[in-house]
């Protein structure tokens, strides 16, 4: 077991997959500048900086994937993905279906998102739900260092386009990485980080930490909270969510992105459709505001759901105590 940052875990995953498969190439905004070790090992043919032209980067990746390569492209910040929607959604996301399976699109798109660096509204915008809504795409957004590595390796090996969102607030945070020869985390599998029987807390990315902290506080008040890290947003691990809610009877969904039409709404709908009879209280969503991100550290952090808000939402569902 070693301790490294999520950013280093991403670097390890890229290097291991490039060694394993010569078809894997990496290009994008500043990748050769940021990843000197990859340039030294694999050369400028497989690791390339590009102009700041997101539509061209994504379009090139879609073409490379259709031609038999396995590109990983870095578009830096999630809002920049809006410049590349046509290539990602209309080409990579749909052409496998439209071709009757004749083409595959094994491409990974990296983008940083969320609060933590005070980069303002044009660089900080949680857009993950927009891509979850697009057919043909897979979407992952890990919280743990091991999952950053294992999910990226799985994404590179997948024959479909995968959006890999990196929470800015977690990028430089150290975490434990198991000593494994080939660490793979399956796409579509959630992780139960803490068992509980009174309320289920479902989250992803940095707000997973808020849920774990809230669960600790709730335990001191006699409330047993189960914490689920979705890890993958599409496909969602519906079974893990439903299994937990059928046990606890209560659900709080937490994410930093805007509450309106967010991932929490989908999770709530799944539970409402398939586990309504198990609910002992209304479903609660704790999420960010419908507003552009602020550049001020204080205002930026105020928009991110914290442990206190999660704790209060859970206590509201159990009436401040656990029924006998």
Image: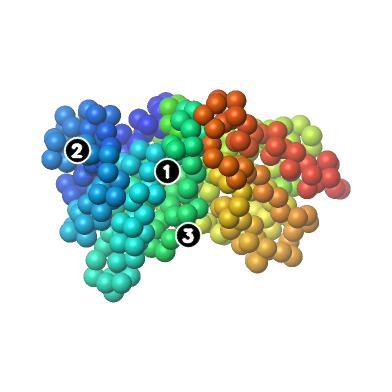
Q: Is residue 303 left or right of residue 66?
A: right
Q: Which residue is mark 2?
A: 48
The percent position of residue 8, horizontal first and vertical second, equals 35, 30
The residue closer to the viewer here, 255 or 52, is: 52
The percent position of residue 75, horizontal first and vertical second, equals 33, 42
Q: Which residue is mark 3?
A: 133
Q: Earlier in the sequence, mark 3 or mark 1?
A: 1
Label 3 crowd bin: few (<14), some (14–19), many (20+), radius 10 Å = some
The percent position of residue 256, horizontal first and vertical second, equals 57, 41
Separation of residues labelled 1 and 2 (CA atoms): 22 Å
Q: Is residue 244 left or right of residue 88?
A: right
Picture quadrant where residue 32 is located: top left
At x 30% / y 72%, what residue is drawn? 98
Q: Which residue is mark 1?
A: 79
Separation of residues labelled 3 and 1 (CA atoms): 16 Å
Separation of residues labelled 2 and 3 (CA atoms): 30 Å
Element at label 1: helix
């Amino acid at each position: 077991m070693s301790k490294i940052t999520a950013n280093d875990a991403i670097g390890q995953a890229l290097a291991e997959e490039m060694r394993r498969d010569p078809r894997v190439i990496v290009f994008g905004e500043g990748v050769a500048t940021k990843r000197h070790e990859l340039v030294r090992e694999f050369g400028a043919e497989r690791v390339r900086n590009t102009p700041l032209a997101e539509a061209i980067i994504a379009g090139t990746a879609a073409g490379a994937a259709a031609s038999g390569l396995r590109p990983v492209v870095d578009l830096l910040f999630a809002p920049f993905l809006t410049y590349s929607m046509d290539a990602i959604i209309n080409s990579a996301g749909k052409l496998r279906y439209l071709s009757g399976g004749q083409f595959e699109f094994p491409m990974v798109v990296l983008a940083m998102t969320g609060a933590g660096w005070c980069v303002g509204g044009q660089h900080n915008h949680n857009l993950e739900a927009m891509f979850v809504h697009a057919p043909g795409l897979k979407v992952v957004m890990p919280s743990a260092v091991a999952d950053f590595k294992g999910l990226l390796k799985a994404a590179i090996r997948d024959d479909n386009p995968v959006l890999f969102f990196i929470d800015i607030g977690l990028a430089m945070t150290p975490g434990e990485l198991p000593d494994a020869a080939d660490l793979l985390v399956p796409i579509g599998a959630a992780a139960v980080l803490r068992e509980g029987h009174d309320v289920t807390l479902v989250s992803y990315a940095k707000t997973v930490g808020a849920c774990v902290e809230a669960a600790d506080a709730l335990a001191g008040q006699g409330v047993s909270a189960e914490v689920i890290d979705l890890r993958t947003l599409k496909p969602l691990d519906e079974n893990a969510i439903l299994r937990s809610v059928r046990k606890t009877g209560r659900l709080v969904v937490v994410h930093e992105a805007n509450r309106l039409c967010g991932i929490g709404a989908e999770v709530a709908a799944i539970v409402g459709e398939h586990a309504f009879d198990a609910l002992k209280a209304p479903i609660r969503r704790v999420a960010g505001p419908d507003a552009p991100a602020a550049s001020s550290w204080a205002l930026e952090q105020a928009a991110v759901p914290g442990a206190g808000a999660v704790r209060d939402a859970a206590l509201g569902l159990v009436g401040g105590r656990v029924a006998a």
